[in-house]
């Protein structure tokens, strides 16, 4: 008789949990069994037990069966059922995690090397910032190609705002960057904002003190301002874009 035709009761559930705890299930067999019997299992267990046994949704193959194994072991122990807990699922999960971490590091090294190889002008113009950035780049981080003067002109016309000369210099190297540690500067993402009855142009985000804190510009100034939204305060941050990159952001990336 196929397992799927066996009526679900306490005895058949206990037998299945013993198989799970002793390592006789695979991620696929456990997932398929659960999908077929979830509603029946829910009637046989209390809510806490059910949630501990339920396979979690996870990107790793072995995590769901490993966490379910721990839930099954607790249920069996509570009911006085003795069995030998297998370490197989944990070992497979640790191997999978190790492979994932190695692949992430490989991708990060490639990303960093690509940045160095493709952007020599960055290291010439912003050496401290570029060195710090190259060390922390993640595979998901984004470095856009240089903007053209025409693209910068169009954005200025759209904003009705003349960008400071040193900000333009930056965009002529890159139309924008997004770094997962809390830094985003995008030519196409700039917009106006009014804070305490004063108008600013938002250059980007810099999570110096909290998520969502912003870098700001004012008409006719090279000064970079900073909006700390939790304090609801605008503060002068540095004299110009070069100082922002070479001092503030280089230090921030090094520390984060």
Image (cartoon, rainbow, N blue to C red):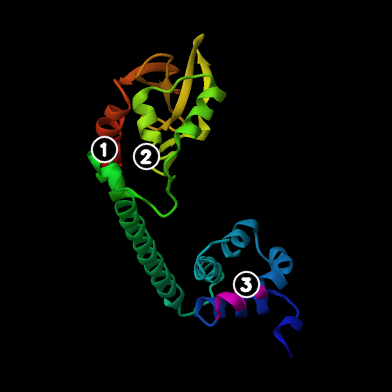
Q: Residue at x 35, y 64 (%)?
A: 106
**Helix, strand or loop under label 3:** helix
Q: Do the residues labelled 3 and 2 touch (CB within 8 Å)?
A: no
Q: Which badge, 1 or 2, comes first in the chain's sequence?
A: 1
Quarter of the image with the C terminus in it? top left
Which numbered disc covers residue 31? Answer: 3
Q: What secondary structure is the stretch in magenta mostly built from? A: helix
Task: Specify the quadrant of the image occupied by residue 225.
Answer: top left
Q: Which of marks 1 and 3 is nearer the N terminus?
A: 3
Which residue is disc 1 drawn over? 125
168 shown above or below 231: below
Q: Is mark 2 on a helix, strand or loop?
A: loop
Q: Mark 2 points at which residue?
A: 173
Which region is colored magenta?
25-33
- Residue 74, given in percent of the width and then of the height, sits at 51, 66
Residue placed farthest to the bottom in the image?
A: 1
Q: Does the magenta stretch include residue 29?
A: yes
Q: Residue 208 carries which label?
A: none
- Side (left or right) of 14 relative to 204: right
How many neighbours does mark 3 have within 10 angstroms: few (below 14), some (14-19), or many (20 or more)? some
Q: Position of residue 37 (x, y in %)?
A: 71, 71
**In terms of image quadrants, where is residue 253?**
top left
Q: Is residue 201 visible?
A: yes
Give the CA separation, mark 3 to mark 2.
50 Å
Toward the viewer: 171 or 70?
A: 171
User: From where the camera sits, is residue 126 visible?
Assistant: no
């Amino acid at each position: 008789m196929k397992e799927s035709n066996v009526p679900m009761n306490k005895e058949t559930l206990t037998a299945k949990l013993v198989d799970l705890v002793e390592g006789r299930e695979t991620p696929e067999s456990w997932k398929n069994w659960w999908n077929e019997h979830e509603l029946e299992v829910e009637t046989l267990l209390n809510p806490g037990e059910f949630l501990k046994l339920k396979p979690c949704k996870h990107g790793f193959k072995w995590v769901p069966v490993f966490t379910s194994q721990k839930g099954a072991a607790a249920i069996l122990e509570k009911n006085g059922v003795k069995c030998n807990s297998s370490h197989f699922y944990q070992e497979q999960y640790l191997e999978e995690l190790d492979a994932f971490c190695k692949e992430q590091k490989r991708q990060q090294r490639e990303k960093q090397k690509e940045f160095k190889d493709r952007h020599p002008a960055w290291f010439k113009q912003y050496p401290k910032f570029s060195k710090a950035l190259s060390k922390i780049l993640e595979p998901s981080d984004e470095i856009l190609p240089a903007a053209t003067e025409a693209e910068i002109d169009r954005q200025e016309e759209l904003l009705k705002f003349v960008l400071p000369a040193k900000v333009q210099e930056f965009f002529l190297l890159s139309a924008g960057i997004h770094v997962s540690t809390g830094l985003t500067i995008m030519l196409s993402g700039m917009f106006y904002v009014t804070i305490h009855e004063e108008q600013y142009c938002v250059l980007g985000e810099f999570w110096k003190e909290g998520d969502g804190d912003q870098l700001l510009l004012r008409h006719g100034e090279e000064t970079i301002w900073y909006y700390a939204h939790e304090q609801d305060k605008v503060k002068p941050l540095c004299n110009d874009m070069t100082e922002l990159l070479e001092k503030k952001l280089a230090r921030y990336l090094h520390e984060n």
